[in-house]
Image: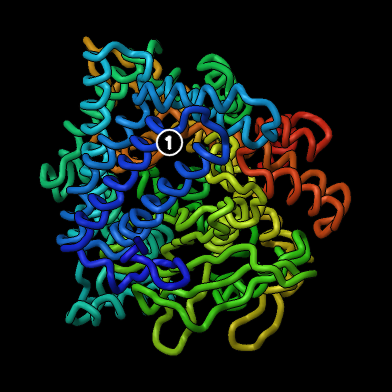
């Protein structure tokens, strides 16, 4: 049967994804999967790759391609009806996943395939991962514990989704209407125009501020009105909590405790001491001790410099602006003033040089020179919103189509905050199927205002390059087996390598000259401005480092030290971590954890350290280009062939050493961050 939610080219038919049809479509696919599993486990006497693994991959892929656009729309075009349909499917998918992971006949058949000779390395890695995941799904457990595992998995799916919904609802519910423009003194024209446009779109006069990042961040960075900064800060850091202007309305407190308790119980069922150990079963890091040693070492190297940076900021605010006591809602504001004072540069000064159309053209030019692929926009495709664009990625030499991707760049109501790349379809090749990879790339940049195009800050340019690095990892894979193609099967603490790696080309003059040009005059960034930009590159880098280490240590310790008798001790552990690494101490009402979706609703539970772990890899990888030239063709080919094309088909460190010729070290990261080694 053809997929009713896909068009003739196998891409999502967004217009057909009606909330009333979603559950039936998923029910149909799940029934199809169960029928195929029953047939294969009962009829195939001697399982092989061709007669067993490939048919399962194909039926799993049909389920994935049905669910993927539903999940995507739930994140970017959320509605009450779609949310209800999405939530109705979650327990069904959770049950199916557990059922498959605990199917002993299926497990034995995969074991039989794994014992065969003449499998290629990628096939062996995939089977190794599958057998590992069977154990992590409880295939070895007695019936009573299997049933409990299923209950926990289903509950976690619902709890984490509810956490995310609460954050989205709390973010959308808060806004502040401003009638007196004087209250917005200090905001750059781009932020004022966005606030005016947001008000107009909602039928209001004046200006409207929201907690969406393109609205929130300029206030915290530029607004002279300290009370206004405090008001937005308080609303932002208390979202979905028991504090702040919406106290108790979408409170995630109980959800967080229940999520931690269920994760710990699940880990213990599988024989792990805690969820941190369970998390590392699929990662590069060998042990909790190794992760904590890594994080503590970076903290020890960074915290002294971070304290010095904060002292400099406090002295500047006191001496230049008469502020005797810096508060958290002052940090961004006076940091920007210090940056301008010291380097005569601001993010707003750079913004006119980064119209999104030119940045995309430059990004695609960088990728073409590095990896030998060309990116072309498609004019005809089905979309779900006018902002969305669609692109193809082809080989420069042969013109062969390698992949496709949707780009959804701008912030709007009913769209989850942040930036991400997600899988639409995986690369897969069997005797019956030849499928290219397709990706979703999602950002939340400021939209065009009036006749002015969307102008990005330099930080947003980095975000775009970052997410496109994930996209390249997915789209350039040459592995034909979905489970280890692209980002699939890549350890979570290695998956950020291509994304962080790509950020480096936002700083090199040679690459900036491909796209950084004033939106009105077409002039490139003047050399003096570029020099100031580079001088300011590591401004407060140690403060930024310890902030990320605070998140990572909190996440890992909370999962590693969980005690059922004492609960999550969330605030206690946050406070302990801050004693160790934080230089900025937030007020008692701060509830940042209540909107920490990465670990409570995303894939980063006991894994937030992955950003820093992968940053070591990415900085070390880029050091090869620093040695040879930022567009060195041989180095680019080596990265493409050993990292981007190989996906999860081999051990991540083996692939890295094959690319770099040695294992990574932290020297390049500390040097790039301006922190003394």
Query: In x, y percent, where is residue 363?
Result: 65, 67
| Residue 263 in the figure: left or right of residue 495 | left
Looking at the image, residue 68 sits to the left or right of residue 122; the answer is left
Q: Position of residue 361 (x, y in %)?
A: 64, 75
Residue 27 vs 555, above or below: the answer is: below
Q: Which residue occupies 70% across, 68% down?
A: 400
Asked if residue 580 is positioned above or below residue 478 in the image, the reply reads: above
Residue at the image position 31 percent from the left and 74 percent from the top:
195
Residue 405 visible somewhere in the drawing: yes
Q: Quadrant of the C terminus?
A: top right
Q: Is residue 539 visible?
A: no
Task: Name the side, left or right, on which 218 lies relative to 201.
Answer: right
Q: Helix or strand or loop: what does disc 1 sit on?
A: loop
**What x and y, as percent, mark residue 442?**
44, 61
Quarter of the picture containing the N terminus is: bottom left
Q: Up-down: is 291 above or below 627?
A: above
Residue plotted at (31% across, 66% down): 4
Residue identifier under label 1: 604
Residue density around tag 1, few if under 14, some if 14–19, many if 20 or more, within 10 Å: many
Res. 115 image quadrant = top right
Which corner quadrant of the image does residue 79 belong to? bottom left
In this picture the colour scheme is rainbow
Counting from the top left corner in percent of width and height, residue 349 is at 57, 71
Residue at the image position 83 percent from the left and 50 percent from the top: 635
Residue closer to the observer: 496 or 110? 110
Task: Using the rendered view, name the quadrant where residue 7 is placed.
Answer: bottom left
Choose between 577 and 464: the one closer to the eye. 464
Q: Nearer the viewer, residue 90 or 33?
A: 33
Q: Nearer the viewer, residue 312 or 319?
A: 312
């Amino acid at each position: 049967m053809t997929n009713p939610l896909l068009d003739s080219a196998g891409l999502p038919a967004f217009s057909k994804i009606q909330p009333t049809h979603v559950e039936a479509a998923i029910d149909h696919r799940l029934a199809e999967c169960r029928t195929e599993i029953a047939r294969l486990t009962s009829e195939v006497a001697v399982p092989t790759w061709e007669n067993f693994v490939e048919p399962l991959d194909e039926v799993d892929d049909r389920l994935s391609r049905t669910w993927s656009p539903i999940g995507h729309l739930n994140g970017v075009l959320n509605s009450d009806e779609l949310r209800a349909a999405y939530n109705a499917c979650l327990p069904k998918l959770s049950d199916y996943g557990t059922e498959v992971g605990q199917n002993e006949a299926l497990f034995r058949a995969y074991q039989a395939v794994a014992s065969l000779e003449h499998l290629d390395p990628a096939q062996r890695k995939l089977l190794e991962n599958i057998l590992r995941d069977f154990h992590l799904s409880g295939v070895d457990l007695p019936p009573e514990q299997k049933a409990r595992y299923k209950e926990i998995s289903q509950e976690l799916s619902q709890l984490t989704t509810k956490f995310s919904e609460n954050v989205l609802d709390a973010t959308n519910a808060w806004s502040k209407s401003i009638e007196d423009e004087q209250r917005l003194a200090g905001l750059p024209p781009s932020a004022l125009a966005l606030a005016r446009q947001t008000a107009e779109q909602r039928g209001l006069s004046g200006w409207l501020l929201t907690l969406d990042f393109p609205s929130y961040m300029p206030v915290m960075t530029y607004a002279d009105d300290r009370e206004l900064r405090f008001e937005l800060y308080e609303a932002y850091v208390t979202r979905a909590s028991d504090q702040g202007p919406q106290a108790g309305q979408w409170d995630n407190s109980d959800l967080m405790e229940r999520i931690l308790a269920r994760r710990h119980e699940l880990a213990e069922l599988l024989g792990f001491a805690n969820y941190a150990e369970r998390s590392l079963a699929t990662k590069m890091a060998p042990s909790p001790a190794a992760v904590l040693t890594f994080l503590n070492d970076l903290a020890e190297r960074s915290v002294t410099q971070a304290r010095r940076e904060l002292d400099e900021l406090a002295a500047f605010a006191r001496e230049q602006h008469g502020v005797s006591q810096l508060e958290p809602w002052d940090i961004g504001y006076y940091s920007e003033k210090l940056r301008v004072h010291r380097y005569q540069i601001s993010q707003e000064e750079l913004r006119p040089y980064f119209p999104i159309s030119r940045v995309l053209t430059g990004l695609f030019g960088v990728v073409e020179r590095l990896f030998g692929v060309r990116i072309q926009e498609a004019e005809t495709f089905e979309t779900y919103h006018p902002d969305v664009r669609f692109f193809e990625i082809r080989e420069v030499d042969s013109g062969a189509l390698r992949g496709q991707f949707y780009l959804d760049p701008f912030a709007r109501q009913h769209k989850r905050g942040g930036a991400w790349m997600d899988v639409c379809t995986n690369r897969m090749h069997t005797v019956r199927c030849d499928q290219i990879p397709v990706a979703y790339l999602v950002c939340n940049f400021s939209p065009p205002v009036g006749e002015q195009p969307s102008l990005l800050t330099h930080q947003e340019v980095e975000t775009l390059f970052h997410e496109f690095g994930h996209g390249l990892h997915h789209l350039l894979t040459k592995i034909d087996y979905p489970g280890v193609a692209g980002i699939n099967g890549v350890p979570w603490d290695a998956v950020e390598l291509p994304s962080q790696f790509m950020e480096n080309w936002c700083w090199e003059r040679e690459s900036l000259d491909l796209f950084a040009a004033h939106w009105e005059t077409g002039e490139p960034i003047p050399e003096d401005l570029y020099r100031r930009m580079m001088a300011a590159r590591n401004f407060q880098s140690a403060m930024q480092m310890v902030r990320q280490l605070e998140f990572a240590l909190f996440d890992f310790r909370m999962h590693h030290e969980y005690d059922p008798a004492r609960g999550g001790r969330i605030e206690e552990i946050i406070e302990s971590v801050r004693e160790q690494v934080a230089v900025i101490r937030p007020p008692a009402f701060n509830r940042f954890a209540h909107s920490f979706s990465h670990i409570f609703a995303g894939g980063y539970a006991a894994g937030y350290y992955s950003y820093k772990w992968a940053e070591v890899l990415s900085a070390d990888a880029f050091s090869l280009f620093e040695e040879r030239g930022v567009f060195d063709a041989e180095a680019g080919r080596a990265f493409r062939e050993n990292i981007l094309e190989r996906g999860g088909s081999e051990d991540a460190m083996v692939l890295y050493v094959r690319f770099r010729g040695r294992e990574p070290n932290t020297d390049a990261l500390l040097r790039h961050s301006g922190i003394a080694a």
